[in-house]
Amino acid sequence: MIARSVAVGLFVFCMLSVAYWQLHSWLMNPATLPVKVVRIDGELKYLQKAELENAVATVVSGGFFNIDLKSVMNKAHELPWVDEVSVKRVWPDTVVMEIRERVAIARWGDKHLVTASGEIFLPNELMPEGLPVLIGMDNRSVEVVELFEREKPRFARLGLTISRLEVNRRGAWSIKFDNGLQIAIGRMDIKNRLQRLADNFTAITQRGNPEYIDLRYRYGIAVSWKKSKGAV
């Protein structure tokens, strides 16, 4: 009796195993429920949906159950404007990509862009207009962005907009504003020197229209003035 029960149990187990592998093979067959739709969600400004579709076309293949979602995600990440991407299946034949686009706060040099976290990337042919320019060695991008973000609101309160911020190879900092005013800051005590400028800027402008301000002095500020029209 026991032997018969064991035999029956083994028979049922074998039948279930065969059924499982047949079902698994059917589900993993690319011809079973093929993916027909790739849906792209997210607010896109510089990314084109066609560009995303082309980027993932080589890996969006197979059936609903065996499509490699990680490969789809990795391919989308190769596009310069893609910051974050998630991929999921939606029954019965759709793959959905949720895209978050990178946000550039400034240009980095001539051709690149930089994000608020200091991440540098080379965009496609679509280059945002009207961005300030940040310049420095790539390994100092976080430091440059932090200084820019810290000083931007301070100078905005003074009616100044930073159009260019640079740290050169010697470590010397400088700023240019959209009104043409240029500031030489130097290599040391950057925060205090800029604070000194902010504290004295109203007094400076009361005396005239500054063209160049040199903060590379321990206690003072040197100012060059714009010549008035008609002055000789």
Image (tube, rainbow, N blue to C red):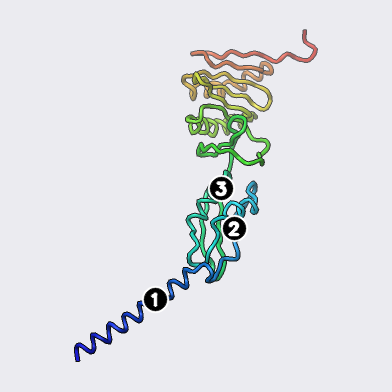
Q: Mark 1 points at which residue?
A: 20
Residue sitting at the far bottom: 1
* Numbered label attached to residue 82: 3
Towards the viewer: 113 or 67: 67
For marks 2 and 3 on the same chain, the one whose residue lies earlier in the sequence:
2
Image coords of residue 112 (percent x, y): 59, 35
Indicate the quadrant where residue 164 lies: top right
Q: Quadrant of the N terminus?
A: bottom left
Name the element at disc 1: helix
Q: How dense is the environment of label 1, judged by Cα within 10 Å: few (below 14), some, or many (20 and up)?
A: few
CA distance separating discs 2 and 3: 12 Å
- Looking at the picture, which amino acid does disc 3 mark? Val
What residue is shown at x 49% (from left), y 54% (from top)? 71
Q: Distance between the residues labelled 3 and 1?
A: 40 Å
Residue drawn at x 35%, y 81% is: 15
Label 2: which residue?
41
Please name the amino acid that badge 2 sits on: Asp
Residue 208 or residue 64, whichever sits in front: 64
Q: Is mark 2 on a helix, strand or loop?
A: strand
Labels in figure, total: 3
